[in-house]
Image (cartoon, rainbow, N blue to C red):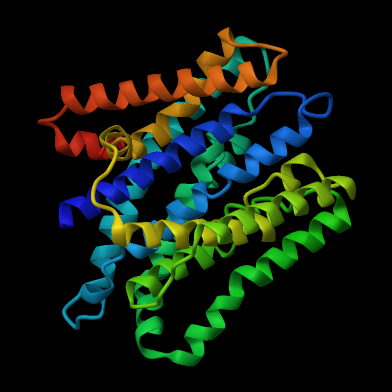
């Protein structure tokens, strides 16, 4: 039973990382000319990915162990935040920064070292690395969060307001300035609600949604995105994963996933394997996508994103899988590069 549960959640990780790759494969296309509405619809479908990853990070926190008196908070934070998150983040950020630096030098662009350092620190060396910076922030406050959920009802209820209040701030900023706040997705309040939800579910909160709940929430997110577009908001905002509609949709998807986990008797082996490689795919797929993008350019939107997505997914998965097999006796090295 435990192995089936593990395979199920690894399959969910596989689905989520494929959704992340698809999100990035949709980039660099002029949606103002063609397929803008189709793009909105597709983006809303896959906008559950990061929220679900964050939820799972909270759900698989060892809440029972953290509440033990002999539990060492500092050691756990260092092992999870340092060994699991920081080291691969530093390795890959240096690599992506080095590639970017080499391109600037080759093209004769002046090098701004402070800019490189800034992007490195805030997780901008590659597009999705903000996610690791968010997890590091959440990891630091995790022991405190678990104790709050277990012991303080008033504070526990108050913390549910953090993400909605932050979302309100993001909306006000966008409507006032016409653009999103700097680093709005990198600050932990944006994703706090999903991590906190995961911890609460781990500690006994019931969370189940039916398929029709997901469909209604998805429709709401699409309508919201279309309204925001009509109001003249930027594409990056109205298609973002950080909107009320997308967050509502993500919560229902997570609830539906949880409902399915009770009756799941098997899993798709390929998706499970992709899930096993998901952390490595996260780190390598942007480099692969850059190379794939050199060869795949098309005015046909459907052909454009499907080829970029398929090639990037297959190559990234193959790189991590082969890396795991070649270095299977070097567990520490695999951990340092995020391949396990």
In the image, is residue 212 above or below residue 235? below
- Identify which residue, 164 or 286, lies in the foreground: 164
Q: Is residue 232 visible?
A: no
Regarding residue 165, the answer to whether it shows in the image is: yes
Residue 254: x %, y % from top left: 46, 59
Looking at the picture, how far across and down is residue 331, in whole percent? 15, 37
Q: Is residue 14 left or right of residue 19?
A: left
Q: Is residue 225 left or right of residue 12?
A: right
Q: So how many labels did they put on this image?
A: 0
**What residue appears at the point 48 percent right and 51 percent down from the top-left corner?**
133
Judged left or right of residue 154, residue 28 is right
Q: Residue at x 44, y 63 (%)?
A: 138
Q: Is residue 189 above or below residue 231?
A: below
Q: Residue at x 71, y 23 (%)?
A: 29
**Quadrant in the rendering for residue 31:** top right
Q: Position of residue 280 (x, y in %)?
A: 34, 34
| Residue at point 39%, 62% (across, down) | 259
**Residue nearer the viewer, 294 or 6:** 6
Side of 179 relative to 20 (left or right): right
């Amino acid at each position: 039973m435990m192995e089936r549960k593990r395979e199920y959640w690894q399959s969910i990780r596989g689905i989520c990382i494929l959704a992340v790759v698809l999100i990035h494969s949709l980039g660099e296309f002029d949606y103002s000319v063609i397929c803008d509405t189709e793009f909105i619809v597709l983006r809303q479908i896959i906008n559950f990915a990061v929220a679900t990853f964050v939820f799972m990070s909270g759900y698989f926190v060892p809440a029972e162990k953290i509440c033990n008196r002999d539990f060492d908070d500092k050691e756990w934070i260092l092992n999870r935040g340092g060994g699991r998150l920081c080291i691969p983040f530093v390795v890959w950020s240096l690599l992506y920064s080095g590639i970017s630096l080499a391109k600037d030098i080759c093209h004769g662009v002046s090098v701004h070292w402070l800019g490189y350092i800034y992007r490195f620190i805030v997780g901008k060396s590659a597009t999705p690395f903000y996610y690791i910076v968010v997890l590091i922030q959440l990891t630091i406050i995790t022991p405190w969060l678990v104790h709050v959920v277990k012991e303080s009802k008033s504070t526990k209820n108050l913390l549910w307001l953090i993400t909605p209040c932050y979302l309100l701030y993001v909306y006000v900023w966008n409507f006032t300035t016409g653009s999103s706040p700097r680093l709005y997705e990198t600050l932990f309040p944006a994703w706090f609600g999903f991590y906190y939800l995961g911890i609460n579910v781990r500690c006994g909160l019931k969370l189940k949604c039916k398929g029709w709940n997901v469909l209604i929430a998805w429709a709401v997110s699409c309508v919201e995105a279309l309204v925001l577009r009509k109001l003249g908001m930027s594409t990056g905002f109205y298609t973002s994963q950080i909107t009320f509609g997308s967050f509502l949709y993500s919560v229902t998807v997570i609830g539906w996933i949880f409902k399915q986990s009770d009756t799941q008797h098997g899993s798709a082996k390929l998706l499970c394997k992709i899930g096993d490689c998901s952390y490595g795919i996260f780190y390598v797929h942007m480099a692969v996508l850059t190379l794939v993008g050199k060869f795949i350019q098309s005015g046909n939107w459907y052909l454009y994103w499907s080829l970029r997505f398929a090639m990037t997914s297959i190559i990234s998965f193959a790189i991590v899988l082969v890396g795991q097999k070649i270095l299977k006796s070097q567990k520490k090295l695999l951990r340092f590069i995020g391949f396990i």
